[in-house]
Amino acid sequence: MSGSNKYARLTPEEAAELIPDGSTIGFSGFTSAGSAKVVPRALAKKAKILHSQNKDFKVRILAGASTSNSVDGALAEADAISLRLGYQSTKTMRNKINEETIDFVDIHLSHIQQQVKSGMLGKVDFAVIEATDITDDGKVYLSTSIGASPTYLECADKVIIEINQFHSLRLREMTDIIAIPKPPRRKTIPIFTPMDKIGKPYANVDPNKIVGIVYNDEPDETSKFTTPDETCAKISINVVNFLLNELKADRIPKEFLPLQSGVGNIGNAVMKGIGEHPDIPPFTMFTEVFQDSLVEQLEKGNLLGASTSALTISSENLKKIYANMDFFAPRLVLRPQEISNNPILTRQLGVISINTALEADIYGNINSTHVCGTKIMNGIGGSGDFERNAYLSIFVCPSIAKAGKISAIVPMCTHIDSSEHSVEILITEQGTADLRGLSPLKRAYAIIKNCIHPAYRDYMYQYLASAPKGHIRHNLSTCFDLHKNLIKHGAMLPNVRDIGL
């Protein structure tokens, strides 16, 4: 039960009735970790009923990053969303964005809290925030993610708290919440190692804004990542070998540097490979998401500790953490995303960033977000927060997709999220291209030689040879031929079929 008896106890349906058409809602959740659950589902049910009566009902959704099926999925399926801001990863939401029935604003995750607090994104009418506890004086103890929840609690006109009794009350022992003031009153953030704590274990809210509390005991809707396939394993080996070479060359200090890793199966495989290699010393992480493979690395002592914004792990691993909080609580720090993704701290701590590309081009530009330049996948998330300011900026991806019908490396990206100026290392299962200190043409040759699948290598060499000379060679009449082939024939090179690895 909550530590307070002050606030009205509501059913999910009663809470949903308080939210009118056209509201802007700040939901908790950074991935599905800590995402609101029962209120958004009740809101979706309300929308369907109103729509059946030919009445309007849509809301604008803000969150920390992606959320869960209970928020993005249920509300998108109910046609209850007019605008979604920030990273998303739900199929129904993605389809409706690409059908242009939901407006989507893709934004760096470190920017969200500042833009909300400054009023750049308009007024926040409601915050719907998952917590483990709340006190009479407005201390809110958040659950498995911090994300942007402290900002929504501060800025929303009205607040609904979902008290989730599935989660451990001891999560507060990991939590470190500070708020960055508006300029010009900012000072240096005194975090000098990933495990430094400088804030409070709770977020604050004006108790007068709380219109009710809803209880549930549901686990996070986090899916367990699949076992790494051969491609992921090869990428992991190549990342490990690159880091070992950097250690031998004294470009990484002997005690190593903090790591950041993007979310997903490749990220899980890479972190497992790094953690289990005997020649890489025990390390820390300063990252945005803590994933399944890292639980085992903490237990083995390969990972010494991690600063993150969310515990994006399976229920099985979360239960393991809750059963052994004496071990895990001192080794994990949960922070707001304006801290976990802070570019200044990334530079200050010397973070090595490892993020996944959807598409790269032969010069090292990265497309993280759009298929053929038009269809959104998920969004930029936090990759841009880290890559520009990292000590080493690494991007990884498979060289091919769809059994070879698609090359992930193309002459020119159809959309660019991270430019060649910020991408130092590109790694696929084929190999590693170290792009540091190389002119554009030499970058292109390094990527073609080391990263591109052999089935596409000759094509890329021929493309370079056909392009007019310049600081960057491009043939503007043919640079998107692979994409046009994919759209027309279902394969970038129509004669290449099921080439495997």
Image (spheres, rainbow, N blue to C red):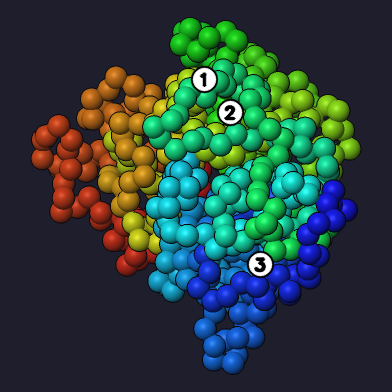
Q: Position of residue 59 (x, y in %)?
A: 53, 70
Say which quarter of the image contains residue 185: top left
Residue type at the position of mark 1: Leu
As drawn, 123 above or below 54? above
Of the pair 296 and 72, the residue shown nearer to us = 72
Q: Point out the tag, 3 or 2, that comes first from the N-terminus.
A: 3
Residue type at the position of mark 3: Pro
Q: Which mark is residue 349?
A: 1
Q: Which mark is residue 40?
A: 3
Q: Is residue 414 visible?
A: yes
Report, in whole angstroms, how far the alpha carbon at label 1 lies from the one at label 3.
Answer: 38 Å
Q: Point out the tag, 1 or 3, that comes first from the N-terminus.
A: 3
Say which quarter of the image contains residue 12: bottom right
Question: Horizontally, is 271 left or right of 142 in the view?
Answer: left
Of the pair 22 and 92, the residue shown nearer to us = 22
Of the pair 53 and 97, the residue shown nearer to us = 53
Q: Point out the tag, 1 or 2, that comes first from the N-terminus.
A: 2
Q: Is residue 369 visible?
A: no
Q: Position of residue 409 (x, y in %)?
A: 37, 43
Q: Position of residue 257 (x, y in %)?
A: 55, 18
Residue drawn at x 61%, y 51% as measured from the top left: 153
Residue drawn at x 58%, y 49% as measured from the top left: 154
As drawn, 321 above or below 301? below
Q: Residues within 10 Å of mark 1 (few under 14, many from 20)?
A: some
Q: Residues within 10 Å of mark 3 (few under 14, many from 20)?
A: many
Mark 1: secondary structure? helix
Residue type at the position of mark 2: Phe
Which residue is identified by label 2?
286
Report, in whole angstroms, how far the alpha carbon at label 1 lies from the one at label 2.
Answer: 8 Å
Mark 2: secondary structure? strand
Mark 3: secondary structure? helix
Q: Are marks 1 and 2 in contact (CB under 8 Å)?
A: yes
